[in-house]
Amino acid sequence: MSDNRLILALDVPNALAGLELAKTLGDTISFYKIGLGMLTGGGLALANELKAEFGKQIFLDMKLFDIGATVEAAVRGLAQFDLDFLTVHGDPYVVEAAKQGAAGSDLKILAVTILTSLDRDDLDNALIEAGDIPDLVATRAGRAFDAGADGVISSPHEAARIRALPEAAGKLIVTPGVRPAGADAGDQKRIMTPAQAVAQGADHVVVGRPIWANADPKTAAQAILSEMNNPQTVTLNTPA
Ligand code: C5P
């Protein structure tokens, strides 16, 4: 089984395309993230098939957010599938409800701190208190850990700060916003290479388009894994 620190975001149009890609990638990728976009296209069935038939680890990126009772019920239902990671928003009551729903299963609850797509104006519009986003992310991460989260999702730029929190001991940090050296940044703005993200304290890095949109996804994934294991060779192409 290959290095499970690399999680492939399977943001392809439907389950059939996801299954074809997983077959192409074979043993190169052992951990898949299935997001909301795929759920209406057979995502849960694909998750089951990747786990049961191919022995892959599964991260269901649902970013649940609702009243506690509803979150708990949703997670209890999902915990009956053999999934590894599930995301919820990082509000402590949401995390606590999700942990109750996951009780008795191996499902790990990851808390989204603040969506990396949001800027200060968006937070103002959402009536979220004043402060720099990295400070708020660190505070939200600490509170999510206190509420029982098994890990958090953050930008690689906040990973070191979160890793240094006393509450983060033994917890997972998972970072999207990662690009291999020289890759197109796409709409991701605050990027790091996979090796840099791991050096900052990430346990897993999530990569999507640089692999699945590549004409040769297997070679692209292998290059990222090799870069992660030979970080001294890495130089970062930061967008202007
Ligand atoms: O294609 P790319 O590597 O940018 O994909 C990153 C994945 O991580 C996508 O599935 C995206 O939805 C997800 N993600 C993100 N930023 C977050 C949370 C999730 O890019 N803050």
Image: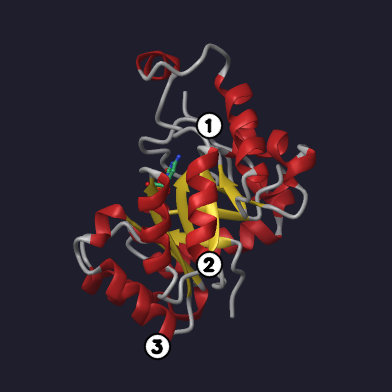
Dot 2 corresponds to which residue? 107
Give the amino acid type for the residue marked by disc 3 in the picture: Glu
* Residue 107, x across and y down, in percent: 53, 67
Residue count near mark 1 (Cα–Cα under 10 Å), binned few <14, some 14–19, many ≥20 = some
48 w.r.t. 234: above or below:
below
Which residue in the protein does label 3 denote?
A: 53
Task: Give how far across and how far down residue 195 sits, in percent.
Answer: 65, 50
> Residue 66: percent from the left, percent from the top?
36, 43
Q: Are marks 3 and 2 in contact (CB under 8 Å)?
A: no
Numbered disc total: 3
- Please state which of the two labelled residues, at mark 3 or mark 2, is closer to the viewer: 2
Disc 1: which residue:
238
Is residue 179 in sight in this rendering?
no
Query: Is residue 95 or residue 170 the one in the foreground?
Result: 95
Query: How far across and down, in percent of the image, does residue 154 sit?
Result: 56, 40
The amino acid sitting under disc 1 is Thr
Residue 223 seen in render = yes
